[in-house]
Image (cartoon, helix red, strand yellow):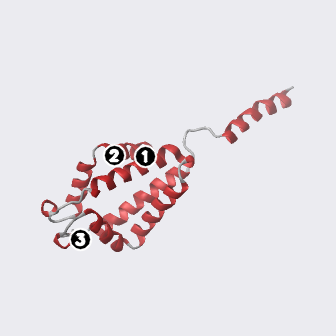
């Protein structure tokens, strides 16, 4: 169920990134109305949503490079969030010196890192898709039962 919720979140982030960005700004900034966002912010949010959806839908068939990058970003956010926060501020906002951060930005960034790691882990676990190995095992089972009972 968590996988489906995260896929839904990713789809919303692809289609309507603006409300999600505004919510994040309200959570992380004391002055969200006084900031000038770069156009790259919408593209970045859409890309994040696309990565979530792609990895979670494709599972093990998804790109290991993309999964590794998302996992590395998640780990960096959990362990050393401040440099990642500063980098993202420079990518998203035109005048970073005008940003007034809330005191809980670092814990929120760590939670985002946990979210990235969760998506990475969920993408590695097999979903409901059937693999060739599963099909081979299913084919052997009835034959085995027939031999034992016959």
Label 1, label 3: how far apart the Cα atoms are: 31 Å
Q: Nearer the viewer, residue 110 or 68?
A: 68
Residue 80: x and y in percent read: 39, 73
**Where does label 2 land, which residue?**
14
Q: Which badge, 3 or 2, comes first in the chain's sequence?
A: 2
Locate the C terminus and report the quarter of the image it occupies.
top right
**Where does label 1 land, which residue?**
53
Label 3, label 2: how far apart the Cα atoms are: 29 Å
In this rendering, the answer to whether 118 lies above or below 81 is above
**Where does label 3 land, which residue?**
103
Relative side of 73 to 90, left or right? right
Disc 1 element:
helix
Relative side of 115 to 45, left or right? right
Of labels 1 and 3, the one closer to you: 1
The residue lying at 47 percent from left, 65 percent from top is: 72
Q: Which badge, 1 or 2, comes first in the chain's sequence?
A: 2
User: Would you say the residues marked 1 and 2 are in contact, meaning their CB atoms lie under 8 Å apart?
Assistant: yes
Q: Nearer the viewer, residue 129 or 46?
A: 46
Disc 3 element:
loop
Q: Residue furthest left?
A: 34
């Amino acid at each position: 169920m968590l996988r489906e919720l995260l896929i839904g979140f990713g789809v919303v982030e692809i289609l309507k990134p603006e409300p999600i960005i505004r919510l994040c700004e309200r959570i992380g900034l004391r002055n969200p109305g006084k900031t000038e966002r770069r156009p790259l912010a919408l593209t970045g949010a859409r890309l994040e949503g696309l990565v979530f959806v792609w990895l979670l839908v494709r599972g093990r068939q998804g790109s290991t490079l993309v999964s590794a990058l998302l996992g590395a970003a998640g780990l960096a956010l959990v362990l050393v969030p401040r440099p990642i926060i500063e980098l993202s501020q420079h990518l998203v906002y035109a005048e970073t010196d005008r940003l007034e951060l809330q005191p809980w930005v670092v814990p929120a960034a760590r939670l985002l890192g946990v979210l990235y790691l969760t998506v990475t882990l969920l993408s590695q676990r097999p979903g409901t898709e059937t693999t060739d190995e599963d099909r081979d095992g299913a084919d052997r089972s009835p034959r085995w039962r027939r031999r034992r009972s016959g």
